[in-house]
Amino acid sequence: MLKRAFDIVFALVLLLVLLPLLLLFALAVAFTSPGGAFFRQVRVGKEGRPFRLLKFRTMRPGSEAQGQLTIGGRDPRITGIGYFLRKTKLDELPQLWNVLIGDMSVVGPRPEVPKYVAMYSNEERIILSVRPGITGMASINYIDENEMLARAGDPERAYIEEVMPAKLALDMKYVQERNFGLDLRIILATVGKVFGGWSARVH
């Protein structure tokens, strides 16, 4: 109950405080490339329920048909403003709405698309017992995931065989050890890593 109350207050306050900035980003995205300001994608949430995750659109229309993985920071499908939003993780801010309506939490395992959730083992599916988060242990430790995949000969295979299992292990660890103090540490580490360049990892 404390976690959900914190999520509601945190999301509501940030949405109100950042409203002018959110409107500015939405206009910038909408007017610099066709396709609208927002991108909605089906992800798998708590108890395996699908929901529509909200982001600022950072790619050109139809890009998802070419693959759901983003390879490198300079993926040619990414727009100019989209590169900035992705680099600073500001494209994730609309997910505060997902938090407010109960689809997500501020901290938790990042929600995956159905294609990859179908590959989870029975043991790994424990991460579906909690609300997915905007940030989490795996998000911080693999913040440069796109660049890692860009260096792989077969990015899809590298994600499935190397990156995804490592991230799932961290997500399982979070589910087993989660507490309010850990959530606060993850939030602070996220802010520090995105905006301050901290190199610390959360374990």
Image (cartoon, grey):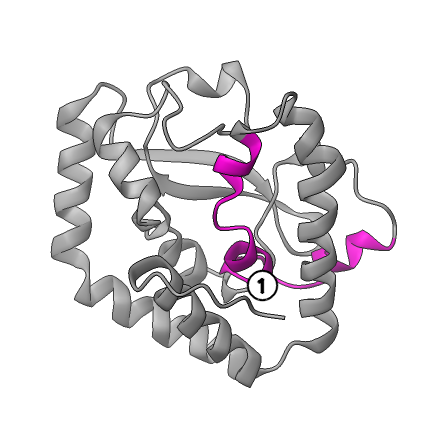
Per the image, label 1 sits on a secondary structure element best described as: helix
Determine the residue positioned at 49% across, 36% down.
146
Instruction: Check the image and report above or below for 120 versus 115.
Output: below
Numbered range of the magenta stretch: 123-149
Q: Is residue 124 magenta?
A: yes
Q: Position of residue 186 (x, y in %)?
A: 49, 71
Determine which residue is flagged by label 1.
137
Q: Give left or right: position of 126 versus 73.
A: right
Determine the residue positioned at 66% across, 47% down.
49
Determine the residue positioned at 32% across, 33% down.
57
Q: Which image quadrant is residue 194 in? A: bottom left
Q: Position of residue 171 (x, y in %)?
A: 67, 60
Q: Give left or right: position of 163 versus 8.
A: right
Q: Is residue 1 visible to us here?
A: no
Of residue 153 and residue 19, the one placed in the foreground of this image is 153
Instruction: In the displayed orientation, state which residue is furthest to the right.
Output: 122
